[in-house]
Amino acid sequence: MKISITGIVVDQFGSVLAIKRDDTRTWAPPGGSLDPDELPTDGTAREVEEETGLKVYPVRLVSLHKIHINGNDHLGFVFRCLLRGGNIKTSAESLDVGYIPPGNLDDVRMATFHRNRIKHALNHPGGAPTWNEIKLSSTERIGTGLLKRIVYPYKNIKRRIRKQEAYIPPVSWRVSTAAVIRDENGAVLWRREPNSEQWTLPGGVVADARPWSAIVSHVQAQTGLTVRPTDLAAVYVLPDNHLHLLWLADITGGTPAANSAWHALATPPATTPHWLERTADATNPHRATTQFKRQSML
């Protein structure tokens, strides 16, 4: 699947940074696709600077969404960002750059899903990000289809005529997920791998870009428990464009299977340092928001 990132930047008057896109001639928050082996936070800062000239620091993940565009599933991260410096300038992708007062968001030409993401980010109270699936309207589906079939091929022809580099489509990512589930005493639920003495957190590969649904299915199949995700604790970038999402989840029903067991944080089962690090990240009492880190293996 494809991974997209969006940066929401607000000035001292509460106005929101936006660009006028060169392909649709409509306004949108700055953002784009995640580069190979790039952290979502780094990708957001890069895209905002490339499209607006401003340097930002993504401080809080406010939403995670799934959207299906032109035959591809996209998993999108939306960050609130702090301005660090730089000067506003346009780019090949942004015909204009400016701040839009929140009261004027409904008056500018902007795709509905962009407008809704901005409004959600402005109203996010803090704490856990939200997650949802975005459905494009029929007009938006037609528009994205025209971009793919007409606008982008035409832009590539212009690039070839001008001897510029051809457009490189976004890379595909493998996405997996795991859950940290704790009992009333703070112990963590672990599962033993089949035909192995190795213990891991319950989870698995995400097939349809809905990691919040995938983790519920994986936990139920592997441990016999039904759970409800409550927070996205951490996101890890692993080698070969692999994104691993770590959730906190509460039990809503079921009985633990024979291959699962509770272990106190101080006495974990036989596992790898990577799983121990993830468990520590998720249970860190000082963690205020979703963490983004690199790891060398699953």
Image: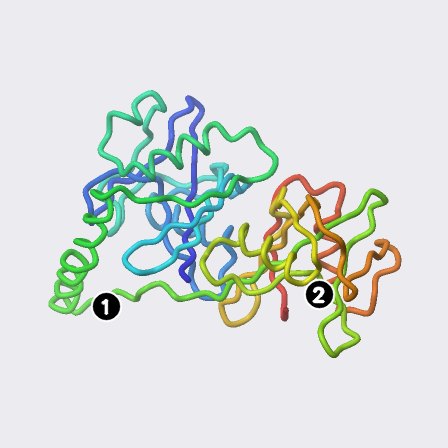
Vertical position of residue 277 compared to residue 239: above or below: above
Q: The N terminus appears in which quarter of the rendering?
A: bottom left
Vertical position of residue 5 compared to residue 72: above or below: above
Q: Nearer the viewer, residue 154 or 282?
A: 282
- The residue wearing badge 1 is 166
Drawn side of residue 71 relative to residue 220, left or right: left
Q: Residue at x 20, y 42 (%)?
A: 139
Q: Residue at x 77, y 66 (%)?
A: 259
Residue 4 % position (x, y): 41, 53
Q: Amino acid at mark 2?
A: His
Drawn side of residue 62 relative to residue 256, left or right: left
Residue found at the very far front of the displayed protein: 254
Residue 136 % position (x, y): 30, 44
Q: Residue at x 46, y 56 (%)?
A: 209
Badge 1: residue crowd in 10 Å (few <14, some 14–19, many ≥20): few
Q: Amino acid at mark 1?
A: Ala
- The residue wearing badge 2 is 274
Q: For mark 2, give the secondary structure.
A: helix
Q: Nearer the viewer, residue 152 or 220?
A: 220
Report the Cα–Cα distance between label 1 and label 2: 39 Å
